Structure formats: structure tokens, C-alpha cells
Image (tube, rainbow, N blue to C red):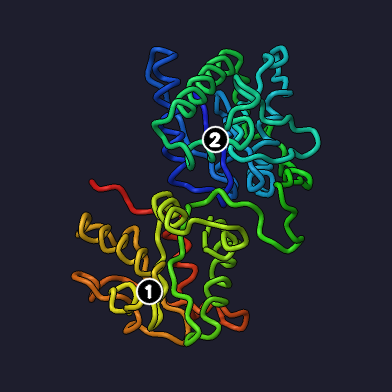
């Protein structure tokens, strides 16, 4: 059976967000069409596994973003669907005037020949300006803005299915379809350096660590870890960029911790002392406050806190530099060396990234 629609997205995207959106869109389309439908996820880079899906799907729903246009697998999937739209099977007329449904996942300048993901209703709303990922990340799944965008996208999917192109036999598929040409992202309010990682829509991760003169180089190691995560598609957040502007730091910490999909607690002697609230005299108030947040997370979720609060050790520190609380003795930790000279095969960075992108498996 052919899929009513497939959701095409880049490997670097937050898979948890994509699956949730895909499920919501499936339900919205089902309710609008009035019957059960079959849908599928189509992740960039899966090669022939994607080709079979794209060759038979009624509608291609593309989550447009800088990562999408930079993903060769997404480019090949797009090219194959475009080939279907112009394909004329034997003894049949041209395909109907079908088009894919382009979702503004994050703002991006499309490659040549690809239309820009359109606005939905209001050209000045957050969806039009910042994309659906930002709507979800900032306003939440239950927001009116998300619900409005979801219903409009469902309507476009149903309209596209009425004009769906015919299935494409394997013998008529181009080999291989061309990927996107070079794309350019829309610049933000500040220009990034050419070597800086692109904006990320992956899982949002807050790095909690301690500044201290007695720990020379530790803050730089944390920043290097954040950079490595960003280059692997993780939306890593630290106080380095926030410190460039005046902040009410308690509010900033609260907002970052609440919004984070994961909290990385980075081991050091000062981090443990402050997180365990053993440092007096007004020193290390930020880590003390963040440590209290983590303890509340542990208290409220004694069986599952380790799925969100991730314990990380950077050189030269060890396991004894992690905060101790009930249940922590046997909890997983990741030992990572973010220095350029480190061999990736000898640390656990890849394992951490795989988990962050996949997320906790749902309970049976």
C-alpha cells in the first residue's frame, strides 16, 4: 500500500520533535480526510530505503531547514519526487499538478530551483519568521500557534493527495537523482564566522558546569565540548554566548533548564562542592541553583531522571568529581575528551550523540 504522505527530514534534525510532529500531522490529516491513512518517516541519508518510499508516496512533506538543504540524502529524495511530477507513464497523460508540501522548519534560503517554504496565514507570526521548530521549542506543543500551523499543513497535504502523481516503477527512476545544489542559510542578527557550526534544530542540551580560578582551562573544555555537539547537530547551550549581554542570571538559568531536552552536568571538584551545596559565602551561586534544579528532577523522577540528566566527565577530572545523591552511584556517565588531539574512537562522544538524537525509548 502506498503512503498517504511521507515526512522528509535531515539526519541532523531532532528526531524526537520530528516523530511527534509527524504523528500529530498524521492524526490531523486522518481527521480531515475521514479515513485511516498510512504514513512514513523519510530520514535523509537512507539511500535506496528512501527511494522506495518516495517513489510511491502520495505527498512529500519536506521539513525545510539549513540542515535539510545541506543533506545530500534529502536532495536525492527531493529530486526523485520532482522526477515523478514530470514523469509521463506509457499510455497515460502527464501527472496532475501536484506539489510537495514544504514546511518552514527553520528559516533557510532554498537552493536554485526549489521554492521557498511558504507562509501559512500571517506573514508576521512566529511560524513565518522563525519556523515550526521554533514554535514548538519556544511556545510548546499545546500552543495555539502550533495547532493553527498543524491544521493548515494538514489541509495542504489533503489537497496535494487529490493531485498525487502516479507511482514510479523502479525501471523509470533516475540513477542516481541529483542532490541539492549549494544552499545558503538566512543570516541572523549577527553574522557568524565562516567556520562556525550552522544553526541547529537538534535536541536542546544545557551544559551545567562550574567556573573557578582553581580549574584552569575547564571552561574552555566545556566550550569545546559544546562546539563538538553543535557540529553533530545538537543544539548545545552554555552561558558563554549569554554572557555577551546583560542578564538576570536566575531567570536565564530557569528558562534554559526548563527548555532543555537534556541537562549535561560536567564534573569538576568545584561543581560537586557547589551542587551539593557545601560552598558558603555567596560563591558559586549559579551552580548551586542549577544543582538544586537537578536534585528536584531526581526527587520527582527517581526511576527516570538519568534519561534527562546526563553526567559527563572531561579531563583531567574523574568520577569522584560528579555530584553524589541517592541513586547516583550506579548511574551512567560519559567520559569525553574534547581536545583536538583526542581520538574519537577512544571516547564516548559518539555514543552520547546517538542517545541525544534518539532520545529515551518509549515505555512498553
Q: Is residue 201 above or below residue 161?
A: below
Q: Residue at x 39, y 24 (%)?
A: 27
Q: From the viewer's perspective, is 138 left or right of 113?
A: left
Q: From the viewer's perspective, is 292 left or right of 103?
A: left
In the rendered image, residue 324, in percent from the top left (x then y), is placed at 25, 76
Q: Secondary structure at mark 1?
A: loop
Q: Which mark is residue 282?
A: 1
Q: Quadrant of the N terminus?
A: top left
User: Quadrant of residue 130 in the image?
Assistant: top right
Q: Which residue is mark 2?
A: 132
Q: CA distance from mark 2 to mark 1?
A: 41 Å
Q: Nearer the viewer, residue 137 or 181?
A: 137
Mark 2 or 1 closer to N-term?
2
Crowding near the residue tagged with mark 1, few <14, some 14–19, many ≥20 C-alpha atoms within 10 Å: few
Q: Which mark is residue 184?
A: none
Q: Secondary structure at mark 2?
A: helix
Q: From the viewer's perspective, is 227 left or right of 267?
A: right
Q: Nearer the viewer, residue 153 or 300?
A: 300
Q: Residue furthest front?
A: 281
Judge whether residue 351 can be spotted in this image.
yes
Amino acid at each position: 500500500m502506498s503512503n498517504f504522505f511521507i515526512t522528509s527530514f535531515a539526519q541532523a534534525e531532532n528526531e524526537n520533535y520530528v516523530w511527534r510532529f509527524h504523528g500529530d500531522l498524521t492524526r490531523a490529516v486522518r481527521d480531515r480526510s475521514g479515513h485511516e491513512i498510512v504514513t512514513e518517516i523519510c530520514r535523509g541519508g537512507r539511500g535506496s530505503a528512501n527511494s522506495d518510499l518516495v517513489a510511491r508516496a502520495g505527498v512529500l512533506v519536506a521539513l525545510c531547514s539549513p540542515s535539510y538543504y545541506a543533506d545530500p540524502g534529502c536532495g536525492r529524495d527531493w529530486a526523485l519526487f520532482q522526477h515523478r511530477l514530470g514523469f509521463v507513464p506509457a499510455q497515460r497523460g502527464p501527472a496532475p499538478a501536484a506539489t510537495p508540501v514544504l514546511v518552514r522548519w527553520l528559516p533557510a534560503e532554498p537552493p536554485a530551483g526549489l521554492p521557498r517554504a511558504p507562509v501559512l496565514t500571517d506573514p508576521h507570526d512566529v511560524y513565518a519568521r522563525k519556523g515550526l521548530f521554533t514554535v514548538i521549542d519556544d511556545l510548546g506543543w499545546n500552543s495555539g500557534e502550533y495547532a493553527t500551523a498543524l491544521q493548515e499543513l494538514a489541509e495542504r497535504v489533503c489537497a496535494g493527495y487529490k493531485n498525487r502523481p502516479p507511482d514510479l516503477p523502479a525501471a523509470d527512476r533516475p540513477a542516481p537523482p541529483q542532490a541539492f545544489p549549494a544552499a545558503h542559510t538566512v543570516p541572523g542578527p549577527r553574522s557568524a564566522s565562516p567556520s562556525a557550526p550552522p544553526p541547529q534544530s537538534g535536541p536542546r542540551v544545557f551544559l551545567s558546569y562550574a567556573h573557578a580560578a582553581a580549574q584552569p582551562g575547564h571552561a574552555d573544555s566545556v566550550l569545546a565540548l559544546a562546539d563538538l555537539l553543535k557540529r553533530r547537530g545538537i543544539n548545545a547551550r552554555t552561558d558563554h554566548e549569554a554572557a555577551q549581554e546583560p542578564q538576570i542570571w536566575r531567570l536565564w538559568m530557569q528558562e534554559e533548564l526548563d527548555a532543555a531536552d537534556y541537562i549535561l552536568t560536567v564534573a569538576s571538584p568545584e561543581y560537586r562542592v557547589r551542587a551539593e551545596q557545601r560552598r558558603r559565602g555567596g560563591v558559586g551561586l549559579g551552580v548551586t541553583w542549577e544543582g538544586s534544579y537537578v536534585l528536584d528532577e531526581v526527587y520527582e523522577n527517581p526511576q527516570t531522571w538519568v534519561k534527562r540528566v546526563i553526567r559527563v566527565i572531561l579531563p583531567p577530572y574523574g568520577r569522584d568529581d560528579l555530584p553524589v545523591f541517592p541513586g547516583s552511584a550506579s548511574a551512567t556517565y560519559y567520559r569525553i575528551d574534547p581536545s583536538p588531539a583526542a581520538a574519537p574512537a577512544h571516547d564516548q562522544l559518539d555514543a552520547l550523540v546517538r542517545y541525544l538524537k534518539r532520545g529515551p525509548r518509549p515505555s512498553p
